Image (cartoon, rainbow, N blue to C red):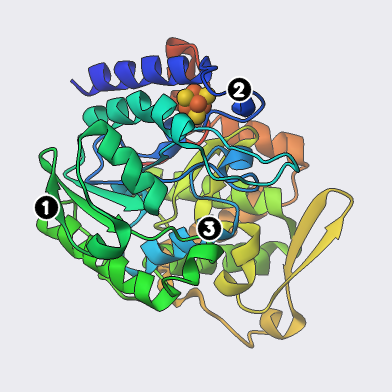
Amino acid sequence: MIADKEQQFVDLVRRVKACKRCPRMADSARVLGAGCGSLSAKVMFIGEAPGRLGADASELPFHGDKSGHNFESLLEQVGLSRYDAFVTNAVLCNPKDENGNNATPSSSEVANCASFLKEQLELVDAPVVVTLGAVALRATALVNAHTLTLKDSVRRAHLWAGRQLIPAYHPGQRAMVHRSFANQLADYQFVAEVVRRGGSTSRRKPSAKVSRASQTVGAAARVLLEESGELSYFALHKLLFMAEVRHLEATSQRLTEGYYVRQKDGPYCVELHASRLAALIPGCFTRTVGKHLLVSLGQEDLLGGASHVGALGEVARRTLSEVAAKYGRLPAGKLKTAVYLTVPMRKLLRKERALRMNLFNSAVLPAP
Ligand code: SF4
């Protein structure tokens, strides 16, 4: 049944990648793929369109730009994670204006993409659907008629097409003028509660300022930096992944609660986005050399001035030390090879060969 669902999704992705219905989207990425999330998600988020600096570049919906950071922060603060969700957009390509900036999709573009939205809704079949912004809400009305408006229906669950439809505001900066971050946080708390009542998977406790995922990822990254000194951003992600795999093999448990996805150069930890390094690893320094971002700890931290590794157990810390000692000084190419030889990566590569497609942005590790 799951395999059948996966095959249907692969077929849908192929048709979307080949779609040419909207002329001005010709050069935009078609943002639908494994990075959207679980096909068994308990909640589906629908945004407006991929952003130029976000999903159009990362192909991971709501990741990499300001809207993405806000969205991820809102999810995190109410205890939801991407493991729980399927995230997509009313239109699957980035609409740009004549200056190359983000534009609002036209009614005809939303209508062009409505059949793809319908297929996603039916395939994922999430009991809770959250629209982010007025465009997304209107798009759902093209799939199954309703008369809801954002202003009158926000933060309420409406029975729609056999599911709960919750209208919410878009997490972009412009929408924050109409609905502040604090108000949006209350909206997401409501969403998380409805998802929980819908019988979703075991959930982290809501309203932690920093989620357990971020705490554990930050703590693990700090240990790697303590052990290795300065690391490239690339190496930090890869070493974290190697430690995760080693810990999983030894204990059958995840080392952190981070969300790792497959990207072109291997696994990438979503929580550890470059813009969040300072928040996750207090006191860390970054500098850029050529194209490379380098990360290190300040002297004070190295002398034990600020240890934040309490979120990790003893075994986890030992594993991180061993990984840092074994792989921390490898050149990038050799580290990448070591990563690709791990069991989860080999399994994913086999699956890609069987499906004859890249599964960029799909989850590489099991949920914690
Ligand atoms: S937005 Fe949708 S309908 Fe338009 S080209 Fe992209 S995939 Fe096709």
Circle nearer the viewer, 2 or 1: 2
Question: Is 68 situated above or below 364?
Answer: below
The residue where tag 1 is placed is: 198
Residue under the point 53% across and 28% down: 30
Q: Position of residue 260 (x, y in %)?
A: 48, 46
| Badge number at residue 67 | 3
Number of residues whose C-alpha sits closer than 10 Å to that of mark 3, classed few (under 14), some (14–19) or many (20 or more): many
* Cα–Cα span, label 2 and label 1: 40 Å
Circle nearer the viewer, 1 or 3: 3
Number of residues whose C-alpha sits closer than 10 Å to that of mark 1, classed few (under 14), some (14–19) or many (20 or more): some
Residue under the point 52% across and 52% down: 270
What amino acid is labelled 1 in the image? Gly
Residue 7 falls in image quadrant? top left
Circles 1, 3 touching at the beta carbon (< 8 Å): no
Residue 26 falls in image quadrant? top right
Secondary structure under tag 1 reads loop
Residue under the point 22% across and 46% down: 42
* Cα–Cα span, label 1 and label 3: 27 Å
Where's the N terminus, which quadrant? top left
One can see residue 367 in this view:
no
* Cα–Cα span, label 3 and label 2: 25 Å
What amino acid is labelled 3 in the image? Ser
Q: Nearer the viewer, residue 39 or 62?
A: 62
Residue under the point 62% across and 30% down: 28
Circle nearer the viewer, 3 or 2: 2
Secondary structure under tag 3 reads helix
| Badge number at residue 23 | 2
Q: Nearer the viewer, residue 264 or 179?
A: 179
> Which of pointers 3 and 2 lies earlier in the amino acid sequence?
2
